[in-house]
Amino acid sequence: MLENFREAIDGIRSHKLRSALTMLGIIIGIASIIAISSTIMGTNEQIKDNLVGSGSNVVTVRLYQGDYPFESAWSTLPEYIPALTEETLKEVRAIPEVASAAYYAQRDAYGQIRSGSSALSAGTIYGVDQSYPAVYGYTIRAGRSLTESDCKNFRKVAMIDETVSAALFAGANPVGKTIDICGEPFVVIGEFTPASSFRPTVTTLDEYFTYNTSSGGKVLIPFSTWPVLFRYDEPLSLVIRARDTDSMTTAGRKAEEVLNDTIQQENPEIRYKSEDLLEQAKNLQELSSATNRQLILVAGISLIVGGIGVMNIMLVSVTERTPEIGLKKALGARRRRISAQFLIEAGVLTCLGGVIGVLVGIGLAYGISKVSGVPIFISWYIVILTVVFSFVIGMLFGAIPAYRAARLDPIDALRHE
Amino acid sequence: MLIRLEHIEKTYGTPDRPVPVLHDVNFTMEEGAYCAIMGPSGSGKSTLMNLLGYLDTPTAGTYYFEDVDNSRASDAEMAKIRNEKIGFVFQSFHLLPQRKAWENVALPLLYGNVPKKERRARAEQALCEVGLEDRMDFFPTQLSGGQCQRVAIARAICMRPKLLLADEPTGALDSKSGQQIMDIFDKLHARGMSIIMITHELAVAERASRMLHIYDGCLSGGDAQ
């Protein structure tokens, strides 16, 4: 076996340039597969991170009119949708996949949140109870969170996030300051940050809109004070925290069902829908994978072409080494041994090409990442798979030349001079 | 009897256009004999050599080697016979250029599954027998033609074969080197090695104990005296 390897390496070494050119096809094929798959996987990881946020597992269930969220600023709620009750919330909390849940109301605010002469250009006002910040996993950076007594006593207090704080107070401690929301004074009691840093890379307009609402400022006020600013019968949304990332979809679906059961009409135009970020992430991932799968197919074809190159060179090599094969046969080498020599040579050649291809591919992936900003993810599974695949290609395309070498008639082989 | 050929026929070409090469060849040879086969080119002497060395099979007739008919042997069995019983020496040496002298000699040992540790020692011993003990680690390109042929002889004898088949062993050498090669054959014969040598040089053939002639596929003087 060791001797077979030596013979194979001798064969490769005695024709360095030719071997290098033979490997080139394999190198290009493997390198492109590695580069493409690394960028796909990187993109997929990024999509998942961006949309799902690592570990927050939060699903929101909101009213939708057709495909768009119901906008309470523009339309009134139809009568068949009753207000959500504490009983419904209890039912939601009883779902096994749900870890915690809270109601909230929300309104977009454009310039209505101000402090002195500074105003927040775009943000969202949330009417919440004291359990809401915990469901989202907010971290209090300064001051305190909402308490039950804030909510019960209709206190006009507000929690603001970093964006709002930066816009209104420019880095100064906001706690204790008064802000103006739609003309009403609210006292800032705390500043919070989301559990996981949520920094999406926005590359398209669609993504911009997707992330815009969440990257704008957030102001939380007790839901009990909501009627002071807006209406009494504002529709509520639900936010739930799933037990884990994988149960997000199920948790969302089940909560959605519970909420829709309260609607007193069949096939209503307006109904509750869970915003399944995991599902969205999967869809986006599939989209990016589908386009890239075609690229991998093309790269795979180049591998096959590389394999044919290997076969071509191996056939030349067999012809060239006919006397050597004849001699070995005369000295008692069996067919198996002769074919093994050529098979191993093809295997070593393609494996070496595969390894070089992997290195080039990783380099290429880093290059792409540098230029386009797309993160990369190198999977060892793919690396090993491609090297094995290139070896298999070597075996496959080395088989015919090896068979021919083994079948050579020793006399013909010896006479060939 | 080491070798017995009975009514050997060999025909090349297609069935409708046969090219006869050997015709009714009968030949016997005892163990320890030293035969020279002479004949002009195209007379069929190389074909005869290939048949004797199990590199080819006759179209008709029977070849007994050590009184055994191996005509139905498989490719692997033929390889085993070539490896263990027959040593080949070719006109053009056929050494592997990437291998050192001793590694070339050790090739048949490798195919005969001789343990790795033993190979070097046995190759060295064979090289000593041809007087190349100081050239073990030389590559063929660093050796003269005569030295190369001596390496080839060492390779042929390192498995201790029954029969040494030499095809024009001095054909590519100058007369002085050729002389040395012939001396080695004499020495091997003196130690009991059976040798069949093909040549067209009378001076070389005369050193053998038996001389045979082949013309147009017919062997004369094939029966043992």
Image (spheres, rainbow, N blue to C red):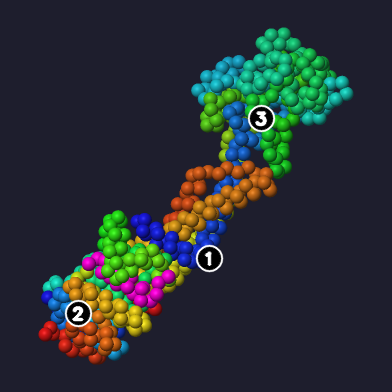
Residue A273 against residue A3 in the figure, above or below: above
Residue annotated with mark 2: B34
Nearest to the observer: residue A42 or residue A407: A407
Q: In the rendered structure, the residue with mark 1 lies on which chain?
A: A
Give percent across and percent down for residue B193. 20, 73
Task: Identify which residue is drawn at 61% across, 21% down.
Answer: A135
Give percent across and percent down for residue A48. 60, 37
Q: Give the range drawn in magenta.
A: B142-160
Please tell me whether the stretch drawn in magenta is mainly helix, strand or loop. helix
Task: Identify which residue is drawn at 36% across, 61% down.
Answer: A340
Residue annotated with mark 3: A197
Residue B68 against residue A167 in the figure, above or below: below
Tell me the quadrant of the picture where the N terminus of chain A can be found: bottom left
Q: Reading the chain from its start, which is encountered first: label 3 or label 1? A: 1
Q: Quadrant of residue A334?
A: bottom left
Residue A367 on the magenta span: no
